Amino acid sequence: MDRLEAFRSLAAEASRGELTFPTNLDATLKLQRALDDPDCDTDTAARLVQAEPLLAARAVAIANSAAYNRSGNEVTNVRAAIQRVGFRTLNALVAAVIVRQLDSKITQPQLRAMADQLWRHSTHVAALAQVIARRVTNTDPETALFAGIVHEVGSFYVLSRAEEFPGLLDGEPEEWIEFGETAIGRGVLAKLGVPATVMEAIEAMWHGMRALPPESLGDILLLANDLAQVSSPLHVRPGATSIQTASTIDFVIGAGSLQSILDESAEEVRSLASALL
């Protein structure tokens, strides 16, 4: 099977909902559903999160990041962290754990390196999206954070299956974008129950529709993707740079500019991205 046939095969499986997930993902999906229950209160959420050490650590780290700890008072337990960041941010953190579990079975060093780069890219996009949503638009920043975390989930899924299809990722990035990204991404996002609003924003990102200054969640994702310091390994070849970088994208918002906002928010972006890693 050549690589284009492999992409088509994976896309067909995804469209039918026939996805191969790691076994440990089921427990996290159950946790996600439990946290989504309207009757889930802070104490219940804290007990559930404490049962997942990685999620518990990230919750406390996010709560103490510059984006959420403007008072400088650190929290030292999960319950206090949830009270500070809220349930929507907590859902974004659960999504982060789910995305990382997708690549947990990768053993080949090259694929492992690609997965690590893809996650660094995702964390930068998520952190930038949160700041841009809060500082530039009226879009909910926690939804933007969530969208940034899951926007490459289809790519993670392909990396998790790549060992089954030798040479799958050896060709041009354009072939992945044309034959795999949209179809496989839709299937994985649907299987994970990603909200329609976020799916629509990711669709807009795939199709390259953007307004500047950003008006929609899709605009925010595209801008954050262009500004991210780490590129997706499935979109850009090693050593390549984005066509549009932080030095070439700028616009005026009120009395300031995008670049001034990014400069002012640099520590927030850095600490938020670091807490997600």
Image (tube, helix red, strand yellow):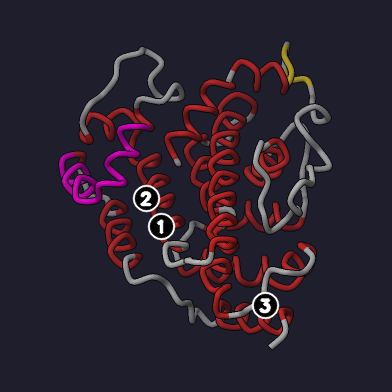
**Position in image of residue 119 (x %, y %):** 53, 49
Q: Is residue 212 above or below residue 181?
A: above
Main SS of the magenta segment?
A: helix
The one of 140 and 247 positioned closer to us in this rendering: 247
Which of the two labelled residues, at mark 3 and mark 2, occupies the earlier sequence position? 3
Q: Are marks 3 and 1 in contact (CB under 8 Å)?
A: no
Magenta segment range?
43-61
The residue wearing badge 3 is 7
Q: Amino acid at mark 2?
A: Val
SS state under label 1: helix
**Position in image of residue 80 (x %, y %):** 23, 29
Q: Which quadrant holds residue 81?
A: top left
Say which mark, if any, is on residue 94: 2
Residue at screen point 80% across, 27% down: 247
Quarter in which the N terminus is drawn: bottom right
SS state under label 3: helix
Residue 64 relative to residue 268: left or right: left
Q: Which quadrant holds residue 183?
A: bottom right
**Position in image of residue 269 (x %, y %):** 54, 28
The residue wearing badge 1 is 98
Q: Residues within 10 Å of mark 2 (few under 14, many from 20)?
A: many
Q: Are marks 1 and 2 in contact (CB under 8 Å)?
A: yes
Q: CA distance from mark 3 to mark 2?
A: 28 Å
Q: Amino acid at mark 1?
A: Ile
